[in-house]
């Protein structure tokens, strides 16, 4: 099969890397791709927002399967546009992608499917939202979410009720553009977060290993949120993972099918797991309609077998070939190396050294890395690359990952030093 991967981050490099190992893969093309996907195939300079250009490229390159990485083209209807031209694509329709692109849609599905989640209300005016905040008790801090897609920035977790009121004003004043025209205010939950991804084809689900990502820029979860500073998999604090997928993904897939809004693609649940109650109470914080980034960079290397027939069956709406893949039972740690200054302003074009000094067993997934005119690999974004190590235990994986991270250098390089530390005995 000839495969077109849409997107240009570490997630897309990890997917391209896995699919390139498939017996049925003839060619990998990425749009726009990055330095990593360029090594596996060919990049074409098309942005993931240019749906017509992607459809044209899929036709002219005789693509058999398009795999869509990011959420924005899914929410804009890329899979529907490809389908209209008879091109097979992995990812949900625009309607089904609402599970990510509308927080309220996701809540309604969870409500109907009796999936545990934070209770919330939808507001379409600042006045009504302020009124709601006023009746909350002094200790009831809420969480505010722009209903629409806001590039991962549309969630505000205020430390004081005054900040909640200020957030309402900001959101309705357009701080998140049209995503904030409707605002969801929900109960604040506490516990440990984990990410649970499953490939879905209608009512058939195929779970992937669980993982935990680290969103803040600095150790001990200090500083601003980022696109993700590292991941480990699998977490040790989650109970039975079969139960988890049966409690969350299966009812959501069933409900969406029953509503005539069948989900095909990757269903990602962001979970809060309350470890204080003793029964590992699970709640969904959000759904994504695509592979997580950076979770994919840690999860994909834990999957044995051929992922391509699984994605193809999902794209066709067929039963998923359960025997095509298995979980290796090993552990992985993936550390993001970022440009100094990120998530604020940073410089690019810095040559990256030491990539060939990395152990053969370690995977480097490129995100903001490009090949410059002199053929050098240089920084081209905030999150530059992810260093992923797989081993029998998290402790070993963590040791190998950091040993290799230290061999990669560029001006201003920065990384967190505590990825997976909480699960590793000192
Ligand atoms: P989301 O994009 O919905 O996953 O939200 C981003 C982050 O905000 C999550 O990873 C949580 O850390 C936090 N968050 C979202 N919803 C809640 C909630 N109801 N209670 C506590 N924290 C939340
Ligand atoms: N790592 C969170 C996400 O992919 O949205």
Image (cartoon, rainbow, N blue to C red):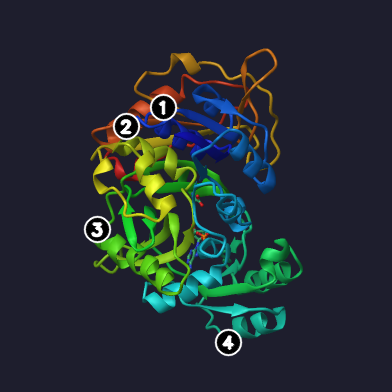
Tag 1 and tag 2, C-beta contact below 8 Å: yes
Q: Is residue 191 left or right of residue 353?
A: left
Which type of secondary structure does the marked residue at label 4 adopt? loop
Q: Which residue is mark 3?
A: 242
Q: CA distance from mark 1 to mark 2?
A: 9 Å
Q: Residue 241's x, y, as percent?
A: 26, 56
**First along the sequence among labels 1 and 2:** 1
Q: Which quadrant: the N terminus?
A: top left
The mark nearer the N terminus, 4 or 1, is 4
Q: Residues within 10 Å of mark 3 (few under 14, many from 20)?
A: few
Kindly state the secondary structure of the residue where label 3 is placed: helix
- Reading the image, the residue beneath label 1 is 363
User: How many marks on residues?
Assistant: 4
Comparing 378 with 248, the one in front is 248
**Residue drawn 27% across and 41% down?**
324
For the residues marked 2 and 4, what is the alpha-carbon distance in whole angstroms?
50 Å
Q: For mark 4, what is the residue?
A: 135
């Amino acid at each position: 099969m000839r495969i077109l991967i849409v997107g240009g981050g570490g997630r897309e490099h990890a997917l391209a890397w896995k699919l390139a190992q498939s017996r049925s893969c003839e060619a990998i093309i990425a749009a726009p791709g990055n330095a990593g996907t360029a090594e596996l195939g060919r990049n074409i300079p098309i942005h993931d927002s240019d749906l017509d250009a992607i459809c044209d490229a899929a036709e002219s390159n005789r693509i058999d399967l398009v795999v869509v990485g990011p959420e924005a083209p899914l929410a804009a209807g890329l899979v529907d546009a490809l389908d209209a031209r008879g091109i097979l694509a992995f990812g949900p329709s625009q309607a089904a992608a609402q599970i990510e692109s509308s927080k309220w849609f996701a809540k309604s599905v969870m409500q109907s499917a009796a999936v545990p989640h934070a209770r919330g209300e939808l507001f379409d005016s600042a006045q009504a939202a302020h009124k709601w905040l006023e009746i909350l008790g002094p200790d009831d801090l809420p969480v505010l979410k722009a209903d629409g897609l806001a590039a991962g920035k549309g969630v505000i977790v205020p430390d004081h009720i005054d900040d909640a009121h200020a957030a309402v004003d900001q959101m309705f004043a357009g701080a998140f553009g049209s995503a904030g025209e409707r605002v969801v205010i929900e109960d604040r939950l506490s516990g440990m977060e984990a990410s649970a991804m499953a490939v879905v084809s209608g009512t058939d689900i195929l779970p992937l290993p669980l993982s935990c990502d680290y969103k803040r820029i600095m150790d001990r979860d200090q500083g601003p949120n980022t696109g993700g500073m590292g991941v480990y998999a699998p977490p040790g604090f989650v109970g039975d993972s079969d139960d988890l997928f049966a409690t969350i993904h299966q009812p959501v897939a069933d409900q969406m099918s029953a509503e005539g809004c069948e989900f095909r693609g990757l269903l990602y649940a962001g979970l809060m797991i309350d470890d204080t109650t003793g029964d590992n109470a699970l709640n969904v914080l959000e759904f994504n309609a695509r592979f997580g980034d950076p979770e994919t960079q840690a999860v994909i290397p834990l999957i044995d077998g051929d992922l391509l027939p699984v994605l193809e069956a999902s794209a066709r709406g067929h039963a998923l070939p359960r025997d095509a893949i298995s979980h290796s039972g090993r552990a992985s740690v993936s550390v993001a190396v970022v440009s100094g200054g990120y998530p604020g302003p940073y410089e690019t074009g810095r040559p990256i050294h030491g990539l060939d000094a990395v152990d053969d067993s370690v995977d480097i997934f490129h995100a903001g890395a490009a090949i410059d005119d002199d053929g050098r690999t240089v920084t081209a974004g905030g999150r530059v690359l992810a260093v992923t190590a797989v081993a029998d235990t998290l402790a070993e994986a963590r040791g190998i990952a950091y040993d290799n991270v230290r061999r990669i250098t560029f001006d201003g390089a920065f990384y967190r030093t505590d990825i997976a530390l909480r699960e590793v005995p000192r």
